Amino acid sequence: MHVLLVFIDGVGLGADDAAVNPLIAAHVPTLESLSAGQRWTAAAVRSDNGRAAFIPTDATLGVAGRPQSGSNQAAILTGINVPQRLGYHYGPKPDAPTRHLLEETNLFKTVLEAGRTADLINAYPPRLHHDINRGKTLRSSIQHAAWAAGLAMHTADDLLNGDALSEDWTARAWREYLGFPNAPTYAPEDAGRRMVEVSRRYDFAFFSHWFTDVIGHRGPFEDGVKLIETIDRVLAGALDAWDDDEGLLIVTSDHGNFEALDHGKHTENPVPTVVIGAARHIFADGYSNLTQVTPRILEALGIG
Ligand SMILES: [Zn+2]
């Protein structure tokens, strides 16, 4: 039994309006199959299509204001209601109290301390390694959790060797923007299959995509439509490769943003959680908010 968590930053369940919500304007047959034929909107309800559970998930965690990545990624990876503990939502990077919580306990750390294997399977470009090492930029809460667990962030070499994946799955960004003309690029479906294959090396693998949140802040809408159609195809490939008896494939987000491109701010909408696998009830039954991710993954892995 292993778990692959596919984290997609800043995607909520919003209006059924093709003028503002790329999830409605786009052709996303895989996403809609995962929610038993429902469009991904605020009106969608918990469902099960026989292979996947779809669960609208609270991301506000009982704290006023717009949820942020720093505190909500930390809630996902600690099981602690971090915004409530802080008294506020905070982001995009974690503040000092949030970093402290992540250093005390997080999902990567707990899995490793149980003698199992865990990894953040993203490759990061040299510039980010440089900036983090020089203290020019903070790690995200996800990166901070992995770091606190003693995991090294994967490099360009790991990408080229096939040991880690590009944030955009296809690795086009490495060729076009990051100065790696020889980076292998993959069709979205193949990238989804590769993500599953890499995840099989670990009891717990975390893949992080963040460009959805960037589009949520700045658009443009057309790019949002293209991006979610790419993600739909990545997930089609992942579902093709995934054996329902091998464990749990989970897709979730930290807060809404991308689904409301009539403005550039986060939303208080619920986020989608999808759980795929024969044992999905272990995670899905009674699941309703982001603080439940960590304890349920640990339960699925038989740790705790
Ligand atoms: Zn954001």
Image: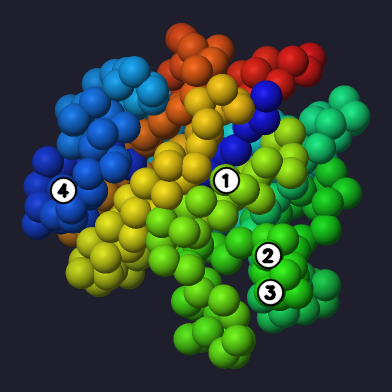
In front here: 142 or 262?
Answer: 142
- In the rendered structure, are the residues bearing label 1 and label 3 in contact, judged by CB atoms less than 8 Å apart? no
Q: What element carries label 3?
A: helix
- Looking at numbered disc 4 in the image, what kind of residue is underneath it? Ile
Compute the Cα span from label 4 to label 2: 34 Å
Q: Count neighbours of disc 3 (C-alpha within 10 A) and say few if under 14, some if 14 to 19, many if 20 or more.
A: some
Q: Where 235 sits versus 58, above or below?
A: below
Compute the Cα span from label 2 to label 3: 5 Å
Q: Is residue 213 visible?
A: no
User: Image check: 18 left or right of 50?
Assistant: left
- In the rendered structure, are the residues bearing label 2 and label 3 in contact, judged by CB atoms less than 8 Å apart? yes
Position of the C terminus by quadrant? top right
Q: Is mark 1 on a helix, strand or loop?
A: helix
Compute the Cα span from label 4 to label 3: 35 Å
User: Image check: 44 left or right of 116?
Assistant: left
Residue ID for mark 1: 196
The label shown at residue 24 is 4
Residue visible at 28% across and 57% down?
Answer: 229
Callout 4: CB less than 8 Å from ligand 1? no
Compute the Cα span from label 1 to label 3: 17 Å
- Looking at numbered disc 2 in the image, what kind of residue is underneath it? Gly
Mark 1 or mark 4, whichever is nearer to me? 1
